[in-house]
Image (spheres, rainbow, N blue to C red):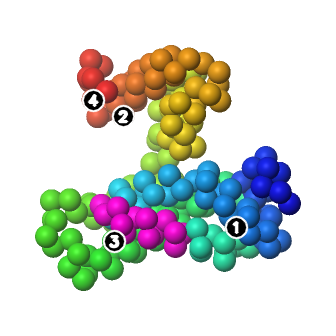
Amino acid sequence: MSYLHLVALTDEGLLQQLQCGVADALAVLFDRHYRLVFSVAHRILRDSGEAEDLMQEVFLEIYRDAGKFDPERGSVKNWILQYANHRSLNRWKYLRLRGHYDERSAYEPPDPRQAPDLVDRESSIRRSLDQLGENERRVIEQVCFEGLVLREVADRTGKPLPNVRNYYYRGLRKLRVILGVGTADAEP
């Protein structure tokens, strides 16, 4: 199957192709989700090099474990993010035990046992997004959940970049208020 045909497939279709031995499907999944995996790993590990290594490990594991995906338990994207979250927390514990964070204790992530569950966090964010205007919600979803940059959102939607940027920052301000982490007049 050609790369162009693979790009047109859904994540679930790509995973089926991986299960059938089409290794190029991994490249498409990687292109779609590497930014999200890296951001999860970096947020937990607080180290770019470690986050990059972990991102590669996650995608290799996805390649090996493609047959373990169960569509009844969620989307491929959530499955990949769960891998990233669990592997990052395990790696953080490993590094912490070996003194990696001793010199940078101010940057140490919070205790993973006290962090809200990924599913709870996502449902809270989804409920908050529902309170935004349609344009704001769509732009934020494309940037945060699909990993697009504002220029790509503008190209995809056909809207001018200044409008897309306005929707994004106005939506972020509203989300900060909704989530209780900012005020209505706070700058982005």
Asked if marks 3 and 4 touch (Cβ < 8 Å), the reply is: no
Image quarter (top left, top right, bottom left or bottom right) of the N terminus: bottom right
| Circle 4: residue type | Gly
Asked if marks 2 and 4 touch (Cβ < 8 Å), the reply is: yes
Q: Is residue 71 left or right of residue 138?
A: right
For the point 62% across and 51% down, the residue is 32
Q: Quadrant of residue 69?
A: bottom right
| Circle 2: residue type | Leu
Local crowd size for mark 3, using a 10 Å CA cut-off: few (<14), some (14–19), many (≥20)? many
- Residue 179 screen position, x and y as percent: 36, 34
Q: Is residue 6 visible?
A: no
| Circle 3: residue type | Trp
Q: Is residue 147 visible?
A: yes
Q: Main SS of the magenta segment?
A: helix
Asked if marks 3 and 1 touch (Cβ < 8 Å), the reply is: no
Q: Which residues are magenta?
A: 46-58
Cα distance in 3D space between marks 1 and 4: 38 Å
Check disc 3 and report the residue beneath it.
92
| Nearer to me, 74 or 51 | 51
Q: Earlier in the sequence, mark 3 or mark 4?
A: 3
Name the mark nearer the viewer: 3 or 2.
3
Check disc 1 and report the residue beneath it.
69
Residue 179's disc is: 2
Residue 182's disc is: 4
| Circle 1: residue type | Phe
Asked if marks 1 and 4 touch (Cβ < 8 Å), the reply is: no
Name the mark nearer the viewer: 2 or 4.
4
| Nearer to me, 137 or 18 | 18
- Residue 176 screen position, x and y as percent: 34, 30
